[in-house]
Amino acid sequence: MAGTVLFASAPAQAQDWNTPYAPEEDQLACSPPANEGDTLSGSSWARDFIAIDEAHQYNQGTYSNGDPVVIAVIDTGVEATRTDVFNDRILDGFDPWTPSSKGKCDAFMHGTAVAALAAGGADGTQFIGVAPKANILPLKAYVDDSSGGDAEKASVVGSLVDDAVAHGADVINISIALPDHPNLKRAVDDAIAAGVVIVAATGNDGVNMDDPNVEADKRTFYPANYPNVIAVGGNTQDGLWYGKTNYGENLDLLAPGVNVVVPYAGGGWFADQGTSYAAPFVAGAAALLKGHFGKDTSPEWIEQRLRDTAIQPTNDFNIWQGYGVLNVGNALTASTEVTDEGPSDDETAGPMENPSTIAAMDIEYDPLATEKTIAWASVGGSIVLITLVLVLRKIIPMGRTRGWRPGSRRREQALATVESD
């Protein structure tokens, strides 16, 4: 399977990429899916929910000199033929399996969808990405969803992070859940030290990322679970926690992750769910902040800004909701100025309404409570059934012996005496 090629053994080809191409025998042609999605028939609920239009009054993904912010999308490639969504804003990127495509072909659909949420252009009044004037740097990490998040892929993604930084990325979106790996951790640390914001999806297993009892081969929580990465889970249309979100102490924000409308690589549109689609909303928001406050705005400040301007839980933070639900409008309209030391509060700027709050989840909340209740109910029902069978096995023979007449302990004892003689 092409998705599990061992890149480390493949020589690099002409191009200044840190990540090597796949061996020639494993390279393959790329074309978008032949079938098409549905017709776009309504506006995405996420657009109003996170106040995208309000944010666009301040920035749409460019710096003050007009240069586009660059968002690297490490995924399945981004389909450049979707010019209705991306126009000509997809840069030459990297595809280890189809070098000639330069990352601008998506034979699956995932990368195209993710890139559109972060930086797709307007399709009438029905769809627009968070940073519609930003450029997209596509870096292909996998071909389809047949290969899991293993150590090899984690190492390759680390190399792609290096490539993203080397090729001018300001923000990197990683909607892939991977195991911890030294190369991935090192690349993430280097990127953030270089001023690049990294946003990652936490994954969709509904697992506590800090639980030491999770089996080692199932601890696919990275790079989201690195403390300096902006870790994103999903929320529903009601602002509620998307129950498949991996959660924990490093979760930063929730963003729309259910019934999210995205473009299909082969044409048309579809709706899907998962933290993969929540992360690019935040990556787009980070791009707007970079554009608005300047290229040198630090990843740490942007992360804190997004936390502070989120629709927050009443207890400020919990492991399921992080610091709350993304609000791009609040992030762009808060009163700030940029100084030599970085952005800071500015009382002369327009006032910002305090973010509203979402109901905090009970500290004793158990995301598997329903499943456990059903399981224990099943166990309880089995115990009752077994007990009933055992009781009936004793009662029925006794009833037959008495001819089903009302009995007494004395009569039963007498019968036993007779039968024993």
Image (spheres, rainbow, N blue to C red):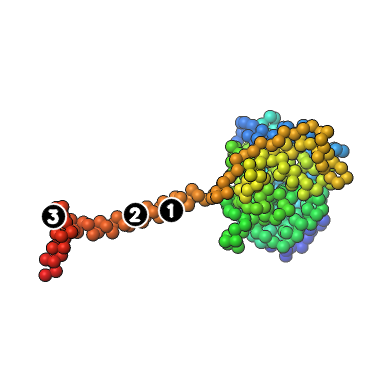
Q: In this picture, is 350 found above or below 308?
A: above
Name the quarter where the N terminus is drawn.
Answer: bottom right
Which of pointers 1 and 2 lies earlier in the amino acid sequence?
1
Which of pointers 1 and 3 lies earlier in the amino acid sequence?
1
Check disc 2: other Cα within 10 Å, few if <14, some if 14-19, many if 20+.
few
Amino acid type shown at disc 1: Trp
* Mark pair 2, 3: CA separation: 27 Å
Residue 376's disc is 1
- Quarter-of-image position of residue 416: bottom left
Check disc 3: other Cα within 10 Å, few if <14, some if 14-19, many if 20+.
few
Residue holding disc 3: 403
Q: Residue at x 40, y 55 (%)?
A: 379
Which of pointers 2 and 3 lies earlier in the amino acid sequence?
2
Task: Find residue 394 and report its horizontal and vertical position in percent.
Answer: 23, 59
Residue 384's disc is 2
Residue 187 appears in view: yes
The secondary structure type at the circle numbered 3 is loop
* Mark pair 1, 3: CA separation: 40 Å
* Mark pair 1, 2: CA separation: 12 Å
